Amino acid sequence: MRLLIIGSLSNQIGAASRIAVARGASVLHADDPAAGLEILRAGKGADVVMVDVRLDIVGFIRSLEAERIGVPVVACGTETDAKAAVRAIQAGAKEYIPLPPDAELIAAVLEAIVADSHALLYADPRMERLVKLAAQVAPSEASILITGESGTGKEVIARFVHQKSRRASQRFVAVNCAAIPENLLESELFGYEKGAFTGAVARRVGRFEEASGGTLLLDEISEMDIRLQAKLLRAIQEKEIDRLGGTKPVKIDTRIVATSNRDLKAEVRAGRFREDLFFRLNVLNLALPSLRDRKADIPVLAQHFIKKYAEANGVPLRPLSAGAKEALLRHSWPGNVRELENTLHRAVLLATGDDIDTDAITLLDGDGDGGHDDGGTGSLVGRTVADVERDLIIDTLRHTVGNRTHAANILGISIRTLRNKLRQYVDEGHAVPAPGEGDAQAGL
């Protein structure tokens, strides 16, 4: 684990640093948020950032968001820093660690944050065969293409490949090609020099350089503009990249793992994806089965999500009733594991009895006993296609608790298409769920 600590090491934060090192973490240090940003811009990378609450955590997190640097932030401070801790959590810090430091607490928090959402759980024979194949090909240096429907767990498999590779001790860097606007993706991947464009206030090392020596995941690569695909192909072939505004190429040693929820062969035929790039990426293919084709995984995953969200929300850990389990097994899961996770998150919040029963299970297409997500889409006769599409998109957004990327994946459209639709709906006066708004909140 790579930990970046921001704050003075002359006090109790120094003790926290020594505990992290003793537990096997690689620790970098910065005196203040500005110096911490410089470390992250330089591509040194971190799995977690621990920041003294007496510093400007709110400004630091906003800077991370503005520069699209994805790293979880943990606040730390003494009990007298309660108001500062609340502000940090409200700004987006994942946890608050009280000082003086407790060794077990620090270890548990850091490990939980790094491991969050990356657990590889399965019981179905089809997944068992796929995991075995992934472990077999992981030690090679070949590029790997992971395909499957949205929400099947492609990033989880990509991280598993990295962990089983000879690069496991180096960095794993993930870039969601669908979530980053087209005009920013190039600078995100290849980095830029100060002054390369308006807003380039300092040199920023790109994800290729940050992942050098390790693994770079290009998530949903089918969403990448075909013009940028040419530059990506050159980077893979030549093992060098050009920063925007740079004067000389930079050598890299980066293994590529890419994912797609689309048929890339069809995208090639349609002229939306370069054939030469497809062959370069598709040296080895791992095809993830949909959740409806591996039903034996559903009870295992359901129990995991119930435990996770019961602990996260401070509510009792309730078992699934037989009826609720049957409803889960009967559902078709168009959103796959991601939809199952959202469904169980809601169920944990909505359940009131001794167990999680069918009344707490709300499903997207309303085929469960407790389903009530049709939102007016049940009767289609007499309605325009545009009206039905709008209701489907907004209902799906509620289902994902306002998460745009997850909603786009479930709907099978690009994040850019979804954003354009939502802007249109807002302009037309329709209510659109904001991030964090949706069924889980509406049911409370």
Image (spheres, helix red, strand yellow):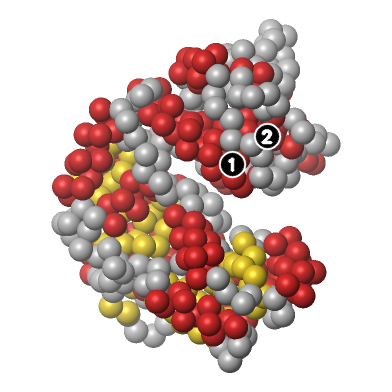
Picture coordinates of residue 31, whole percent (x, y): 59, 88
From the image, tell me which residue sits under label 1.
Answer: 309
Q: Which of the two residues, 105 or 281, is positioned nearer the viewer here?
A: 105
Q: Position of residue 398 (x, y in %)?
A: 68, 34
247 above or below 116? below
Q: Is residue 322 left or right of residue 315?
A: left
Give the side of residue 266 with respect to residue 60, left or right.
Answer: left
Find residue 414 and name its label.
none
Q: Which residue is label 2 attached to?
A: 349
Q: Which amino acid type is marked by label 2?
A: Leu
Residue lying at the far right of the rendered structure: 429
On the question of residue 41 being in view, the answer is: no
Quadrant location of the C terminus in the rendered image: top right
* Residue 207 visible from this viewpoint: yes
Quadrant holding the N terminus:
bottom left
Disc 1 and disc 2 in contact, CB within 8 angstroms: yes
Q: Nearer the viewer, residue 437 or 107?
A: 107
Q: Which class describes the residues within 10 Å of circle 2: few (<14), some (14-19), or many (20+)?
A: many
Mark 1 or mark 2, earlier in chain? 1
Q: With 88 as the anchor, is 125 left or right in this view? A: left
Distance, label 1 to label 2, CA atoms, is 8 Å
Report crowding for label 1: few under 14, some 14 to 19, many 20 or more residues within 10 A (C-alpha).
many
User: From the viewer's perspective, is 254 left or right of 369?
Assistant: left
Q: Amino acid at mark 1?
A: Tyr
Q: Is residue 151 above or below residue 5?
A: above
Residue 231 at what x, y percent from top left? Answer: 35, 64
Asked where in the image residue 251 lies, by quadrant, the reply is bottom left
Residue lying at 54% horizontally and 64% vertically, measured from the top left? 105
Q: Residue at x 62, y 77 (%)?
A: 100
Residue shown at the point (60%, 83%) measured from the top left = 12
